[in-house]
């Protein structure tokens, strides 16, 4: 951002590793009071008696600089002594919980059990990790994403994603119809100059956020720049099942199809240089650049470019 104009108020909708990395880039270029990250909680589940919030933790750990760079989720320098013992005892060990990560789930679960909201607990955890921007769960109530497979089976998200290694073909994603945004999320969106949709999976990371009433309406109705970054590069997702899901749900796995999927919700679309020349709907502003965030410098570079592009659309 330039020194003579104030930074825009930015809300970033994020889920998964791509979302956390763009959020980290934004945190490096914006003052903390100008950035709010609204995070998907559709992946949350109860496991081993604990409340696990994978996307909130991925964002928190990434912004704190303590995430596992190889997997993108979990902690760097992690050990698995507790999980090995769960396995030895015959307990459910299919979800990879490290010892340090378990400390987060134990603490969160204890505070939730005391009656605190997920928003309040997330704020306390962020303070503990030294994360300054606001990291907000999309809602405080459970809002689980379900996967309806091609065979008609209905699987909880983590069962499909981790236990089944996202192999069962997806017929559709089922989202709850009673999820309500928190006052903190509504306030942030009402005040935002720019809303960025991170390069996260549109169906299982972004749609669960847009599905929370009234988030989609706030993006549609209030005049502000809404810009999405493509999670698809040259027909592939850098990580995860987005491209595979698109094929299974009858969509062409391409950046153009992602732009068309977001449709009139977005004013601008950022896509990778490997897809140079992509065609899009008339009226949609396009930015073609290197969207691969290599290291922290890559995250910061993309964040600056996306913000510069979005500010022009305000
Ligand atoms: N993803 C996996 O593919 N395998 C795992 O064992 C796994 C464990 C895990 C533990 C904590 C956490 O915060 C995230 C974890 N993830 C794991 C990622 C998680 O499933 C996310 O929901 C996905 O990355 C989708 O965003």
Image: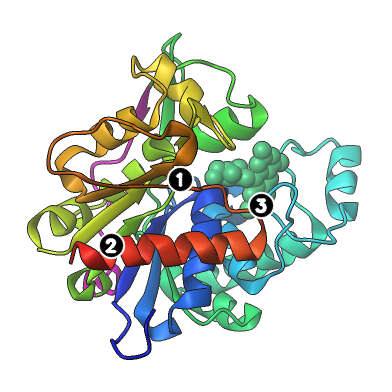
Q: Residues within 10 Å of mark 2 (few under 14, many from 20)?
A: many
Spot occupied by residue 53 in the image (x, y as percentages of width and height): 55, 55
**Residue reaching furthest to the bottom:** 4
Spot occupied by residue 34 in the image (x, y as percentages of width and height): 36, 80
Residue 90 position by quadrant:
top right
Whole-Å distance between the Cαs marked 1 and 3? 14 Å
Looking at the rendering, the stretch of residues picked out in magenta corresponds to 172-187
- Is disc 2's CB within 8 Å of ligand 1? no
- Is disc 3's CB within 8 Å of ligand 1? yes
Residue identifier under label 2: 310
Residue 161 position by quadrant:
top right
Magenta-span inclusion, residue 248:
no
**Which label's residue is closer to the chain start, 1 or 3?**
3
* Location of residue 130 with respect to 189 vertically, above or below: below
Of badges 1 and 3, the one in the foreground is 1
Asked if the residue at tag 3 contacts the one at tag 1, i.e. Cβ–Cβ closer than 8 Å, the answer is no
| Along the viewing direction, whichever of 27 and 150 lies nearer the viewer | 27
């Amino acid at each position: 951002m330039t020194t003579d104009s104030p930074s825009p108020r930015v809300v970033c909708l994020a889920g998964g590793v791509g979302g956390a990395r763009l959020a980290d880039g934004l945190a490096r270029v914006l003052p903390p009071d100008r950035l709010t990250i609204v995070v998907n909680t559709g992946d949350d589940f109860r496991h081993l008696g604990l409340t696990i919030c994978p996307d909130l933790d991925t964002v928190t750990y990434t912004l704190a600089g303590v995430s596992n760079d190889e997997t993108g989720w979990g902690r760097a320098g992690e050990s698995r002594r507790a999980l090995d013992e769960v396995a030895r005892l015959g307990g459910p060990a299919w979800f990879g919980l490290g010892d340090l990560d378990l400390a987060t789930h134990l603490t969160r679960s204890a505070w939730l059990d005391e009656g605190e909201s997920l928003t309040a607990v997330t704020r306390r955890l962020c303070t503990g990790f030294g994360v300054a921007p606001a990291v907000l769960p999309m809602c405080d109530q459970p809002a689980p994403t379900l996967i309806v497979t091609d065979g008609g089976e209905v699987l909880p998200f983590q069962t499909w994603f981790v236990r089944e290694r996202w192999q069962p073909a997806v017929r559709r994603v089922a989202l709850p119809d009673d999820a309500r945004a928190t006052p903190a999320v509504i306030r942030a969106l009402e005040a935002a100059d720019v809303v960025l949709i991170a390069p996260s999976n549109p169906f299982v990371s972004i749609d669960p956020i847009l599905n929370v009433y009234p988030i989609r309406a706030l993006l549609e109705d209030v005049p502000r720049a809404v810009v999405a970054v493509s999670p698809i590069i040259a027909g592939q997702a850098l990580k995860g099942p987005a491209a595979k899901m698109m094929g299974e749900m009858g969509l062409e796995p391409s950046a153009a199809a992602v732009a068309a999927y977001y449709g009139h919700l977005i004013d601008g679309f950022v896509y990778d240089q490997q897809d140079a020349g992509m065609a899009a709907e008339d009226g949609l502003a396009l930015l073609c650049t290197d969207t691969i965030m290599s290291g922290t410098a890559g995250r910061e570079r993309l964040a600056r470019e996306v913000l510069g592009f979005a500010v022009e659309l305000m």
